[in-house]
Image (cartoon, rainbow, N blue to C red):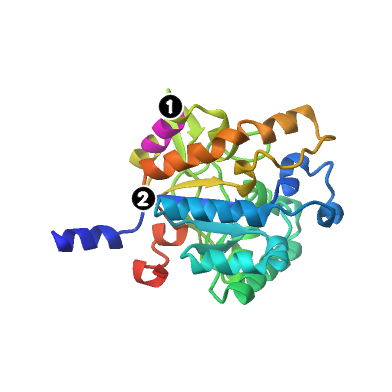
Amino acid sequence: MAEESSNRASRAPAFAMSVDVEDYFQVWAFSDVVPRADWDRFELRVEETTRRVLDLFDRRSAKATFFLLGWIAERAPGLVREIAARGHEIAAHGYDHVKAFNQSRSEFSADVKKTKRILEDISGEAVRGYRAAGFSIDARAPFAYEALCDAGYAYSSSSHPIAHDHYGDPHAPRAAHRINGVIEAPVATAELLGVRMSAAGGGWFRASPYALSRLLISRASKSMDGPVIFYFHPWEIDPDQPRIANASARSRIRHYLNLAQMEGKIERLLGDFQWGRVDRALGIVGAAEVQV
């Protein structure tokens, strides 16, 4: 019986939790009204909200991968070290949230190398994972995986294989697959009534009834070859964040929808499934390497 328990503890997690660490003013919904040059004028709330996420994970004995902007890491190095010290994976989300397909090959290569170096210098740990802003690695960025491999990344989680107005390809692979030396591990999808739907979190999770999200995640676990990867942002549990009044009505509806309910929904999710780090779920590191 003890041996069986040990085997369960060492098994790679079927459900991988991830957090895209960016602040409320850095999201793509507001990028047309909040220029990067103005970011330092805004109140930085990401340290407080991310620590609330860390406490939530501690309460539920969950581990996760934190995809961090290099811009955030430079301004909150203590937060990066705390995430690592609590046993979570440090991964890269690019320096300042520029979509991959909006960069040239040389710009993208410089960005992923810079972000990796910043995060490794601060955390003292190897950074193996990357997630592009807005799930933006697709046919418009054919150079991306080769550049990630050259920079020393082992995997990407930059595909959300659904139909969406900002990203996605509903015909792209749902399962983890290797491209140019890098594993691409898409976030979770499931099929319901013959339609491929997101089971991955973010605005979909805030907008949907919890019972539907739970059903889709359960279906994803039975139909996907590889881990079920979920994601959310620290700003999504911050209903008191300052409002960006000059954004479009559509952007404001998307961004502010159900923020007050999000933390409770995440806590339910952490209780209903057993969540771990993306690198462990992909078998890139073992249990012994992530214990603290």
The quadrant holding residue 76 is bottom right
Q: Is residue 212 visible?
A: yes
For the N terminus, give its image quadrant. Answer: bottom left
Q: Nearer the viewer, mark 2 or mark 1?
A: 2
For label 2, the crowd category at 10 Å Cα-Cα, with few meaning under 14, some 14 to 19 and many 20 or more, is many
Q: Is residue 153 visible?
A: no
The location of residue 161, given as percent across then percent down, is 54, 41
The single residue placed furthest to the left in the displayed view is: 1
**Disc 2: which residue:** 14
Look at the numbered discs 2 and 1 and tell me whether their residues touch, using CB distance below 8 Å. no
Q: Closer to the N terminus: mark 2 or mark 1?
A: 2
The single residue placed furthest to the top in the displayed view is: 193
Q: Does the magenta stretch mainly form a helix, a strand or a loop?
A: helix
> Left or right of 236: which side holds 177?
left
> Left or right of 192: which side holds 44?
right
Q: Nearer the viewer, residue 149 or 233?
A: 233
Q: Is residue 201 above or below residue 197?
A: below
The location of residue 48, given as percent across then percent down, is 64, 54
The location of residue 233, given as percent across then percent down, is 60, 47
Distance between mark 2 and mark 1 Cα atoms: 20 Å
Residue type indicated by callout 2: Ala
What residue range appears in magenta?
Answer: 211-218
Who's the residue at 62% across and 51% down the image? 49
Who's the residue at 55% across and 37% down the image? 262
Q: Nearer the viewer, residue 161 or 212?
A: 212
Who's the residue at 41% across and 37% down the image? 217
Say the numbered circle drawn on residue 192. Answer: 1
User: Circle 1 — which element?
Assistant: strand
> Left or right of 227: which side holds 50?
right
Verify whether residue 216 appears in magenta.
Answer: yes
The location of residue 197, given as percent across then percent down, is 50, 32
User: Circle 2 — which element?
Assistant: loop
